[in-house]
Amino acid sequence: MSRAGDYDIVTDQGSSFTLHLAYQDDNGNAQSLSSYTSRMQVRRSPTDPQLLLWITGSTVDPTNGNAYSTAVTGGGSTGEFAGPTGGVTGSGYLKVGVSSSGATGFTGGILINVDADTMEDVPHGKHWYDLEIVSGTTVHKLIKGRFEVEPEITR
């Protein structure tokens, strides 16, 4: 596996956040993520122990009625929290193996969604994030970079 790609994200405070990625090899072939879970964290700086967002997810589990294991946690009114405890449960998901519309069976697709209420509590400014996939004890960082949140004007 190669080094993580650099990808800066710019989003708006108080608006729903959605990002779809297609995980491919160097030849453009979609890569199966069927044995992986995924996680994404956003922090004010790479060394900050506090989290601004923590999003986790998995592929479809056919033994559980095609349900996903997903979670979105934000900092609530304080904007920050110490993970894995603390924080405020938000709405949204991180789904693996899906299309940009969330349809299953899309090899290599990763769809991230965070609701507007959770994004409203993410402090504006330039933060840092990374997105990893995990299988057992194997961890691959896919992308990393800045997570810039532009301030909300209309409240």
Image: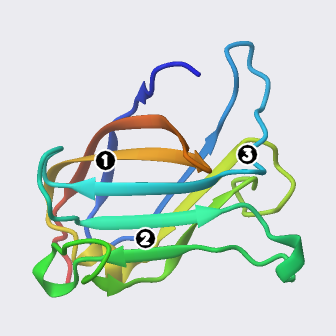
Residue at the extreme top: 27
Q: Residue at x 58, y 64 (%)?
A: 57
Read off the residue under disc 2. 16
- The amino acid at mark 2 is Ser
Mark 3: few/some/many CA within 10 Å (<14, 14-19, 20+) = many
Q: Is 86 positioned to the left or the right of 98 in the image?
A: left
Q: Secondary structure at mark 3?
A: loop
Q: Residue at x 36, y 66 (%)?
A: 54
Read off the residue under disc 3. 33
| Rendered view: 23 above or below 77 | above
Residue 72 place in picture, x, y as percent: 44, 75
Residue 79 place in picture, x, y as percent: 15, 75
- Classify residue 60 by image quadrant: bottom right
Q: Nearer the viewer, mark 3 or mark 1?
A: 3
Q: Which mark is residue 129?
A: 1
Front-most of 12 and 73?
Answer: 73
Q: Residue at x 78, y 51 (%)?
A: 34
- The amino acid at mark 1 is Tyr
User: Quick one: quadrant of the C terminus?
Assistant: bottom left
